[in-house]
C-alpha cells in the first residue's frame, strides 16, 4: 500500500477530488437545464486517476486529454469559473465560449486541451514531447485517453514514433471498461491494455485507478523514467465512470448492480478512510463545503459572463496568412451571412422558402411514392 503523505498534501488531494466531483454533478444539472450546450461527458468516479496523476506533475510539464477533461483542467489549477463559463458558451470560458465541454484549454498551465476526436490527442502529445526534446528541456508530456482510443490507428502510429524517437511521454489509459457503450471485451482483442504497446517497444503497467495514493506512486515512477531516461512508457489506470458515456447515454449496456459494486470502491470515500488519524470529520466537512461554494460561485460567474458577439462568429476559425493553398484562404465573409442577425431570421427564412418554391417544376410536386398530393 502506498505511503500516506503529510496532512497538507492529504488536504490538497481531497480538496481537488471533492471539487471535481461537485463540479461534475453541477455540470450535469446545468446541462439538464439547457445552460450548457453541445455534448457533456462527466468523469464522476474517475477523480483518483485525474488528481493522482496531476498531483505529481511539475507545473512546466504538459498534459493533454480527451473530451472528458473538466476535472483535468481544474486539477491543473484552471479556475472552476472559467471551466463552467466554457460549458455555458460564454466569453470568459477557457476557449472564449467557442469550444464547449469537449475543448477545455489552458495554455498558461500547460493543459493543452481536451479533444473531441477519439485518439486525436495521441499524435499531438508526441509533438509536445518532441518539442521538449528539441529544446533540450527536461519537461515531459502526460497523454491521457480512454480504452477505446487504443483501437484507433493513431494509437499504433504514435506508439511507434514515440518509441523510435525516444520521446519523454507517459501514456495513461483511463480504462473505465467501456468504449462509449461497448465493453472492453467486445471492442479490444487485448483486454490487458498495459501490454498493448509492447509490440512497439513500450512497456506498460496496470494500476488501481480508484486509489489516488497508488496512482501518485506509480505515475511518479513513470514520470521519472520519461524525465531521466527520456523514453515513453504506458500506464493503464483501472477506473470507472458512474454516469453514462455522455449526458445522452441511456446506459442500456450495463446494469445498476455493476455500478453499485464500483461505487463501493469510491475514490473519495476510500481516501477519506485512508486519512483516518490525519484528517478528522470537521476537515472533511470543511473541504466539502468549500467545494460547494466554489461551484456555486462558478455557476453565478458563468451566468453573468456575456455571450460572444454574433459578429465574431467566424473569428479564429480559419488560418489567415500568406501560405498559398486553398486551406489557407480566409473564407470569412466580410459581413455576417443573411439571417445571422436574430431579428432578421424570420423574414430571411420566409424569403428563402418562397424563392425556392418558385423553382419547383409542376411534375416535381408531391411525386414521391407514398406522399399524398
Image (spheres, rainbow, N blue to C red):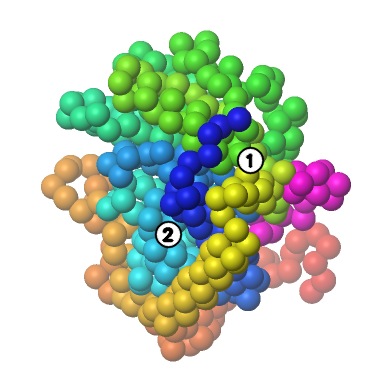
Residue 354 place in picture, x, y as percent: 54, 81
> Camera-side residue: 321 or 85?
85
> What crowding class fits label 1: few (fewer than 14 Cα within 10 Å), some (14-19), or many (20 or more)?
many
Q: Which mark is residue 210?
A: 1
Q: Is residue 170 magenta?
A: no
- Element class at badge 1: loop
Residue closest to the eye, 311 or 261: 261
Outermost residue on the left side: it is: 322
| Residue sitting at x 36%, y 34% | 141
Residue under the point 39% across and 28% down? 223
Q: Residues within 10 Å of mark 2 (few under 14, many from 20)?
A: many
The magenta segment is 246-264
Relative placement, left or right, of 31 versus 355 is: right
Q: Quadrant of residue 224?
A: top left
Residue 100: x and y in percent read: 47, 61
Question: The residue tagged with tag 2: helix, strand or loop?
Answer: loop
Q: Is residue 78 above or below residue 230?
A: below
Pick the quarter of the image with the N terminus: top right
Can residue 146 be seen by looking at this rendering?
no
The quarter of the picture where the C terminus appears is bottom right
- Residue on which disc 2 sits: 99
Observer able to see residue 197? yes
Most foreground residue, 20 or 344: 20
Amino acid at each position: 500500500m502506498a505511503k500516506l503523505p503529510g496532512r497538507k498534501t492529504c488536504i490538497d488531494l481531497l480538496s481537488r477530488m471533492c471539487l471535481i466531483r461537485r463540479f461534475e454533478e453541477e455540470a450535469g444539472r446545468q446541462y439538464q437545464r439547457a445552460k450548457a450546450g453541445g455534448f457533456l461527458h462527466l468523469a464522476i468516479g474517475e477523480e483518483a486517476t485525474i488528481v493522482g496523476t496531476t498531483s505529481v506533475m511539475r507545473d512546466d510539464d504538459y498534459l493533454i486529454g480527451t473530451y472528458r477533461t473538466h476535472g483535468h483542467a481544474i486539477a491543473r489549477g484552471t479556475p472552476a469559473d472559467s471551466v463552467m463559463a466554457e460549458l455555458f458558451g460564454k466569453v470568459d470560458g477557457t476557449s472564449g465560449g467557442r469550444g464547449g465541454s469537449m475543448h477545455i484549454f489552458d495554455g498558461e498551465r500547460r493543459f493543452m486541451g481536451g479533444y473531441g476526436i477519439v485518439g486525436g490527442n495521441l499524435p499531438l502529445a508526441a509533438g509536445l514531447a518532441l518539442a521538449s526534446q528539441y529544446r533540450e528541456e527536461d519537461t515531459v508530456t502526460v497523454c491521457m485517453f480512454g480504452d477505446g482510443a487504443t483501437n484507433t490507428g493513431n494509437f499504433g502510429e504514435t506508439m511507434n514514433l514515440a518509441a523510435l524517437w525516444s520521446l519523454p511521454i507517459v501514456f495513461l489509459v483511463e480504462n473505465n471498461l467501456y468504449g462509449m457503450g461497448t465493453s472492453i471485451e467486445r471492442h479490444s482483442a487485448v483486454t490487458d491494455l498495459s501490454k498493448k504497446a509492447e509490440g512497439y517497444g513500450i512497456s506498460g503497467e496496470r494500476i488501481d485507478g480508484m486509489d489516488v495514493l497508488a496512482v501518485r506512486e506509480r505515475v511518479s515512477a513513470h514520470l521519472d523514467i520519461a524525465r531521466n531516461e527520456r523514453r515513453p512508457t504506458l500506464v493503464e489506470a483501472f477506473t470507472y465512470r458512474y454516469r453514462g458515456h455522455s449526458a445522452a447515454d441511456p446506459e442500456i449496456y450495463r446494469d445498476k448492480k455493476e455500478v453499485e459494486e464500483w461505487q463501493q470502491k469510491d475514490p473519495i470515500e476510500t481516501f477519506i478512510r485512508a486519512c483516518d488519524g490525519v484528517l478528522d470529520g470537521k476537515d472533511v466537512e470543511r473541504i466539502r463545503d468549500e467545494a460547494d461554494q466554489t461551484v456555486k460561485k462558478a455557476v453565478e460567474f458563468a451566468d453573468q459572463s456575456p455571450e460572444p458577439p454574433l459578429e465574431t462568429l467566424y473569428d479564429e476559425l480559419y488560418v489567415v496568412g500568406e501560405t498559398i493553398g486553398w486551406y489557407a484562404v480566409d473564407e470569412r465573409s466580410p459581413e455576417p451571412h443573411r439571417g445571422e442577425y436574430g431579428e432578421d431570421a424570420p423574414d430571411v427564412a420566409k424569403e428563402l422558402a418562397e424563392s425556392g418554391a418558385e423553382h419547383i417544376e409542376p411534375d416535381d410536386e408531391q411525386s414521391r411514392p407514398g406522399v399524398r398530393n
